[in-house]
Image (cartoon, grey):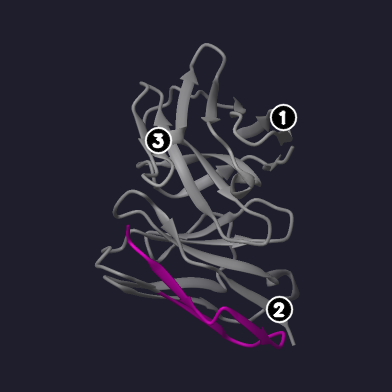
Amino acid sequence: QLQLQESGPGLVKPSETLSLTCTVSGGSISSSSYYWGWIRQPPGKGLEWIGSIYYSGSTYYNPSLKSRVTISVDTSKNQFSLKLSSVTAADTAVYYCARQFRDAGGPTRYWGQGTLVTVSS
Amino acid sequence: DIQMTQSPSSLSASVGDRVTITCQASQDISNYLNWYQQKPGKAPKLLIYDASNLETGVPSRFSGSGSGTDFTFTISSLQPEDIATYYCQQYDNLPQTFGPGTKVDIK
C-alpha cells in the first residue's frame, strides 16, 4: 500500500523559506503515469494546488506561487521536496503531499496525512 | 485560471435523504472533474474521478454526472459517516483548481 509522509519544520519565521519533504513508501517515485504534488489548506479554508513534479524532474507550478516555489525529486531516496521562499502569515496552512494520476492535476488517490506549517516570528 | 463554484456552501439533511451538490466551471472542462470528501483533520479522499467514475472501494451511494461546465454530485441515501466537506476539482487546465467546498451535516 502506497504511503506518503510529510516532514519538516512546523514553524517558520516570516521572510524565511519553508522546506518540506515527502517520503514515499510502498511504491516507486519513478513509476510512469504518476505525478507528485503539493497541495495546501489554510486553517478553515479550501484547497490550493502548489505544484507537481514528474520523476524525470519536469515541474508544474501554480502561477500564483511560481516565483517563490521550487519542487524537486530525489529518486534515490524515493522523496520529493517543496521549498517556498519569502513566506508570510498567509502561507500558514496544512501542507499535503500527494500522488496524482495521469496528469499534474489528475485524480489524487494517495495523500500524506498533512503537516501544519505556521508562519510566525 | 478556471474558477470553480459549488452550491450550496452547506446543507443539513436527514439520514436516508438524497443529497445533491452542484459544481460549475468558468469554462468548458470536458469531464476533467473530480470529487473529494474531506473529514475534519484528515486528508481529502477521492470519491469520483473524470466526472462520473466511482473510485474503487467507494460506496455506490455516491455518484457524479455532468460534462462541460455543469456537474452534479449525489449521495443517494445520506449516512452518518458521510458528514464531511465535499470539493470538486478541475484538471482540464493547470493550475488545477478546487471548488470552495460544500459542508454536509445531519439534521
Q: Which residue is identified by label 3?
A: A67
> Is residue B12 magenta-colored?
yes
Where residue A77 appears, x then y in whole percent?
57, 14
Q: Quadrant of the N terminus of chain A?
A: top right
Q: Which residue is identified by label 2?
A: B105
Compare marks 3 and 1 and give the one earlier in the sequence. 1
Q: Residues within 10 Å of mark 3 (few under 14, many from 20)?
A: few
Give whichever of B24, B48 is nearer the camera: B24
Residue drawn at 63 percent across, 39 percent down? A112
Where residue B76 appears, x then y in whole percent?
56, 81
- Mark 2 secondary-structure assignment: strand
- Mark 1 secondary-structure assignment: loop
- Circle 3 marks a residue in which chain? A
Q: Do marks 3 and 1 both belong to one polypeptide chain?
A: yes
The answer for how far apart the CA atoms under marks 1 and 2 are is: 34 Å
Q: Amino acid at mark 2?
A: Asp
Classify B54 as above or below A92: below
Q: Amino acid at mark 1?
A: Pro
Is B46 placed left or right of A64 in the picture?
A: right
Q: Amino acid at mark 3?
A: Ser
Is B44 placed left or right of A51 in the picture?
A: right
Residue drawn at 62 percent across, 42 percent down? A95
> Is residue A72 magenta-colored?
no
Classify A5 as above or below B77: above
Classify B87 as above or below B97: below
- Pair 3/2: label in front: 3
The answer for how far apart the CA atoms under marks 3 and 2 are is: 39 Å
Where residue A58 appears, x then y in whole percent?
34, 27
- Report the span colored magenta: B1-23
- Circle 1 marks a residue in which chain? A
